[in-house]
Image (spheres, grey):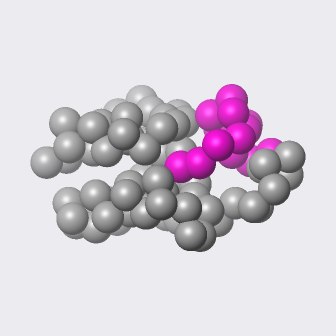
Amino acid sequence: MLELYRLPGCPYCRNVERKLDELGLEYESHIVFPIRFFRFRVKSVSGQSGVPVLVDPAHGIEGLAESDDIVAHLERTYA
């Protein structure tokens, strides 16, 4: 199951959500704290506190950050 760590209102997160929806992919959405300092779960997954972050265990992705990289991975892997 894909997992997406995101922040409501984040345009970069929305781009990733649009791509997931466009490809018809199911995913678990994790809403993160707006204050970066409190994003312990995101940091434990990806090593950094920014969002979005994608986890794709079926393809060995444990914490892919940067929306452009995530969208490229989704297109390459699932399109």
Q: Is residue 29 above or below residue 44?
A: below
Residue 34 x %, y %: 75, 61
Q: Is residue 8 above or below residue 56?
A: below
Q: Quadrant of the N terminus?
A: bottom left
Say left or right for 37 vs 32: right
Residue 71 x %, y %: 31, 44
Residue 9 x %, y %: 56, 69
Q: Residue furthest right?
A: 37
Q: Residue at x 59, y 70 (%)?
A: 8
Q: Is residue 38 above or below residue 57?
A: below
Q: Residue at x 70, y 60 (%)?
A: 32
Q: Residue at x 42, y 30 (%)?
A: 60
How many numbered dots are placed on residues in this image? 0
Check if residue 46 falls in the magenta segment. Answer: yes
Of residues 26 and 7, which is closer to you in this image?
A: 7
Say left or right for 58 vs 39: left
Of residues 32 and 60, which is closer to you in this image?
A: 32
Of residues 12 and 24, which is closer to you in this image?
A: 12
Inspect this view and state whether residue 50 appears. Answer: yes
Write the start and end of the magenta stretch as one range: 40-52
Residue 28 x %, y %: 49, 63
Say left or right for 44 vs 1: right
Inspect this view and state whether residue 30 appears. Answer: no
Of residues 62 and 23, which is closer to you in this image?
A: 23
Q: Residue at x 85, y 52 (%)?
A: 38
Q: Residue furthest left?
A: 79
